[in-house]
Amino acid sequence: MTARRISIVPHTHWDREWYKSYQEFRLNLVDLVDALLPLLERDASYAHFMLDGQMAVVDDYLEVRPENEERLRGLAAAGRLSMGPWYILLDEFLASGETIVRDLQMGIVRGAAFGGVMEVGYLPDMFGHIAQMPQILRQAGFAHTVVWRGVPSSVTKNAFVWESPDGSAVRAEYLPVGYGNGSALPGDAKALVRRTQDNVAEIEEFLLGDLLCMNGSDHLMPQPHLGRVVAEANDLQEDFVFEVTSLSRYLARTTTDGLTRVQGELRSGFRSNMLMGVTSNRVDVKRRGAQAERELERRAEPLSTLFLPADAYPERLLDLAWREIVRNAAHDSICACSVDDVVDAVLHRYAEARDIAAGLAERAVKAFTRSLATAGPSVLNPARRARGGVVELVVPADGPAPDNVQVLSERHGLPGAMVLDANTVRTVLGMLQGPKISDDAWVHEVRIEDTDEGIDITLDIGTEEKPDVPVAAVKQDVYTRLGARPDAVVRVAMEQPSTRRILARVAEVPGYGWRAFEAAALGHPVAVTEDDHAVVLANGRVRVEVDRVAGTFSLEGVPGFGRLVDGGDLGDSYNYSPPGQDSFVDTPDAVVVRVDERGPVRARVRVTATYTWPDHVDGSSQSRVGAHQVDVDTDLEIRADDSVVRVTTSFVNPSGDHRLRVHLPLPRPATESHAESAFAVVSRGLTAEGRPDEYGLPTAPAHRFVTAGRLTVAHQGVTEYELIDVEQGAARTLALTVVRATGMLSRLGMAYRPFPAGPLTPVEGLQMRGSPVRFAYALALDCDDPYRLADDVLLPLEVVASLGGGTRPAAGSELTVDGAEVSAVHRVSGVLEVRVFNPTAQPTRVTFPGRDGWLVDLRGCPLEPFEGSFELRAFGIATARLRDG
Ligand SMILES: [Zn+2]
């Protein structure tokens, strides 16, 4: 019998923030690296240490110990320390595809400063894995990954070939008992041999050969005796050959021959906890995350790329915004399975990223506006597809409004003149910080005249921003004159045209382009009719009938949409778990329906349903007790020439220990769902693999949309959904989780997960009591293009008001991309880069009319040139660098 090799990889798993804050854990990180460096330097037998596959720990350490950068670099260069490849060990389902790519790229770039990253796409603790991860890893040059959670029952060995839907594959090393199977190894050689016998026995059925012994776990320190005890154990016996090594060296000896192939996402709880409930805890975090990603990916980067000169591209600020988003993507951060201080920090980082992104987007839009040749409103389309839509804008109110627009409000010119004393004028001027009076009222010109009676000030007000209005100089001028004539009477006249705020439909605006505003004729105007039983919104393309008693609505004759079902949740931040004596509230005590807008461009109805929800779950009786009355407002909206129904449900959450879901009936029973995941639409069945330690609850995350049984829902923020009401093998209802409130980070003895998944720490913020909850989604039947629907709902057309004087024509486009979805439009070292993906099962031709460039991999290495177009395989991802047009 040949000896079995035991490959010991010393490491630590560093959750950057979790049941303690980032700063608390970092104190321990500094201790760890402080102890690790001399250990590696003095003890050659302590051959290697892996810094958890994420560069963030290096930066976090060096911020405190900048003097040790050279030592880290020296150890990395000598192969004693491996770093990266990730910047952070993220959650794959809750972050966008682009965030995943940027995380990996940031890690690789940062790692280059230390001689390069570990060539293993290490994914030790993620709560399941997305379908496209093998392709992402391959495109970044990785042939290996290491995984634990999510691996299905079909995998019976400690490695498998994991394939993306496009056919890209990596070798996946499977850790059957996790990343800490070799943590806390004994210092005595005989004990080490016995422990290893146990370790081997525990997973013998999985072992293809060597045992990978992961010597470390959450926040564990290195074990200085390791080199010595390994040498002693090797002298002592011949069954095992122990070595202290790196993951890369262990994997270099492996093969993919004869391995099981697994395609697609890994979301099984068959052998380890999936913790699928992290999708629905702290829904505010998921929505803020999606909002920040969208501002950055879909507005700040593309608009800055397309409408600013290349040398004005705000790369550094964009990098800062990305850094916040990538840090938040850490699996314990975005998953919000953390204490409140951590969740507060996560929300703050998202706000910082969003503010940088929104501010940069606004500047790019302003640059675009100033570049237009003609004055007046223009419509800007930040998305790839050419599309029309409904816009809201302010126009001069000259004459009666045409019938193809809907007037929201009118403002008649302000009263001609006011007579003020000098002190009041000083106060008023003090408040005027710039030319902006409101979003649609800007100072265009100020005229000042001294008369015998006093001082006359005339302000011309316009609806659009005019550059270079010298407000500060004018204020100074007035102060000077008032100083000279302190008793003067000041007459202020505002010359402001009457305006009206309108809604109008505009015809198609080119993708990444613009068109001067012109209200289109309405082919299918919206109308509202009502009787004692119902309020009907219809436009000839969609018909919504609101039930005045139930508070629900029918869509194309199918009743019961929008039913809110509130049940108990005695789970924790990781898992939903019903209490022993659960009860449900799904009928309102009272319903009031109010029509807010009646068309012809947009109709809006507000349904206010009053419910009585229990207060919390009583631990001993396992039943829901107490009562709160809560008003839940649901706004329903349809638009002219549009078959989409937009819904916003909002309320202030009064209760704890509960899960509120909205039930949407499926017009056709469904055996599977199709949901957006990173760079793909994934199909999921009605069940999920579980085990006695974790119930296989088939809830799943949808990134921006989910489709089942003719119904497509586009929603704001990653949302948890489940196909329910299964009869004869097909689901009748799609349930979306609106809020899931529990008060525990982790819990013991839950019905759906008996053993803890983290510390048993009460966390009040997880209850979201008193928090405003606002859940916006849109419904469409037989939608053949959910990506279009998501963009229409989440990335609307924008209106700008131009004064003219530039050179840009009245309509045009800065970039045309056809044949694929776009994930990124940005600049890399000044070069225009577009990342596209093909979410369909057919190959596509991606065209960039009139442009040429190079396809590159995710490390930026050129792959092949193209002119005008290139072929993209089914489910493929491609990154194109374009010559500026
Ligand atoms: Zn972790």
Image (spheres, rainbow, N blue to C red):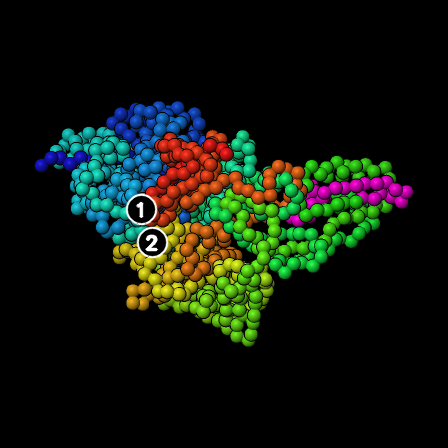
Instruction: List the single residue furthest toward the bottom.
Output: 532
State left or right for residue 738 relative to residue 730: right
Queried on whether the Cβ of the residue with tag 1 lies below 8 angstroms from ligand 1, the answer reads no
448 part of magenta stretch: yes
Residue found at x 43% / y 25%:
67
Query: Residue 501, can we see it?
Result: yes
Instruction: List the single residue furthest toward the left.
Output: 1
Magenta residues, as a range?
430-457
What's the mark number on residue 683?
Answer: 2
> Vertical placement of 337 versus 660: above or below?
above
Q: Are marks 1 and 2 in contact (CB under 8 Å)?
A: no
Q: Position of residue 128 (x, y in %)?
A: 33, 48
Q: Disc 2 residue type?
A: Ser
Q: Position of residue 318 (x, y in %)?
A: 50, 37
Under circle 1, the secondary element is loop
What's the mark number on residue 165?
Answer: 1
> Vertical placement of 27 versus 276: above or below?
above
Residue found at x 76% / y 48%:
495
Question: Residue 261 versus residue 841: which sits nearer the camera?
Answer: 841
State left or right for residue 263 relative to residue 797: left
Examine the residues drawn in magenta and state their main secondary structure: strand
Instruction: List the single residue furthest toward the right.
Output: 452
The N terminus lies in which quarter of the figure?
top left
Label 1 vs 2, first from the N-terminus: 1
